[in-house]
Image: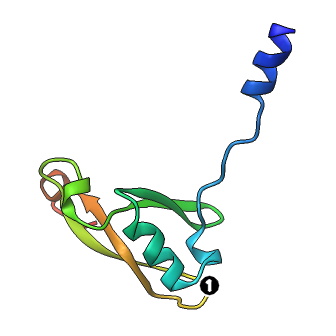
Amino acid sequence: MGLALLLSALTGTAEARPASYRMSCVAVQELVGRSPGIVLDTSPTTFDRYVVNVRYCMPGQQLKPAFERARDNPQCFVGYTCYDPDKTGRDW
């Protein structure tokens, strides 16, 4: 019985991330605005983490505006991504 419970817990379905491309632009913006940092699927094969301000980045990181595809807007401003400006010398 215990083994069956353990196996069912390990093989249970994982909760999917919200998908920006399936939501309206306003819905994505509201979701990001309510979260300290949220990972969104931006296509069936890509994802990223978005924040509303630099408080939710690691120390030393900076913000980069993020525009992603939403259901009703191909260039929806969804919030910001955090990046390390000193690590690569590039702003991405």
Figure quadrant of residue 56: bottom left
Image quarter (top left, top right, bottom left or bottom right) of the N terminus: top right
**In the shown orientation, is residue 79 left or right of residue 3?**
left
Q: Is residue 74 above or below residue 28?
A: below
- Residues packed near mark 1 inside 10 Å, few (<14), some (14 to 19) or many (20 plus): some
Could you say whether the residue bearing mark 1 is in a helix, strand or loop? loop
Could you tell me residue 40's position as x and y percent? 51, 62
Figure quadrant of residue 23: bottom right
Could you tell me residue 24's position as x and y percent? 58, 83
Image quarter (top left, top right, bottom left or bottom right) of the C terminus: bottom left
Q: Residue at x 59, y 56 (%)?
A: 17
**In the shown orientation, is residue 1 left or right of residue 67?**
right
Q: Which residue is mark 1?
A: 71
Q: Residue at x 34, y 56 (%)?
A: 36
Q: Residue at x 77, y 30 (%)?
A: 11
Question: Label 1 sits on what residue type?
Answer: Arg
